[in-house]
Amino acid sequence: MARAVRVQVPPWAPLTETRSPSLAQKLMPNITFVDFEGTARTVDARNGDSVMEAATSNDLPGIDADCGGACACATCHVYIDPAWMDAVGKADDLEAEMLEVAEDVKETSRLSCQIKVTDELEGLVVNTPESQY
């Protein structure tokens, strides 16, 4: 049984020039990260950030992001829930090359640093592998 943990961006984090709740809500799609043990953690992600940034800014386990999002290490490897593959899209050539060095690559594998958060990704579910190395 998956345990759900809710993580939110701190109120002092800059969202926009205004802190309108309706605007903040629009700018903060929810993304759920499920670790290899089945624990689900849902975070608010900022539009324009990468899925990797949403994970690292909320101190979520399972995404190491050694290169900081430069698509140079594959330590932000995730599995996209199959229901979300069309919305997220396929990896480009550079990302596909980097995925060749990741462990346990699957058809739904992506590097989370290459997935930009948009309103269309509200509710996105990604799974993290047991290890990034």
Image: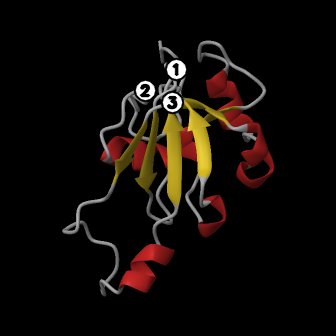
- Secondary structure of residue under mark 1: loop
Q: Which label sits on residue 1?
A: none
48 left or right of 43? right
Which of the two residues, 42 or 95, is positioned nearer the viewer here? 42
Residue located 37% across and 48% down the image: 6
Q: Which residue is mark 3?
A: 2
Report the amino acid beneath label 2: Gly
Report the amino acid beneath label 1: Phe
Q: Residue furthest front?
A: 1
Q: Which label sits on residue 62?
A: 2
Which of the two residues, 84 or 64, is positioned nearer the viewer here? 84
Spatial CA span between label 2 and label 3: 16 Å
Residue located 59% across and 64% down the image: 118
Spatial CA span between label 1 and label 3: 10 Å
Spatial CA span between label 1 and label 2: 8 Å
Q: Residue 109: which quarter of the image?
A: top right
37 left or right of 9? right
Frontmost of labels 1 and 2 is 1
Q: Which residue is mark 1?
A: 36
9 left or right of 31? left
User: Residue 7 appears at what percent x and percent y?
Assistant: 34, 50
- Secondary structure of residue under mark 3: loop
Frontmost of labels 1 and 3 is 3
When the figure is inspected, residue 61 is found, relative to residue 84, above or below; the finding is above
- Secondary structure of residue under mark 2: loop
Residue located 50% across and 66% down the image: 47
Residue located 51% across and 30% down the image: 2
User: Residue 80 appears at what percent x and percent y?
Assistant: 67, 37
User: Residue 67 appears at what percent x and percent y?
Assistant: 40, 33
User: Residue 60 appears at what percent x and percent y?
Assistant: 36, 36
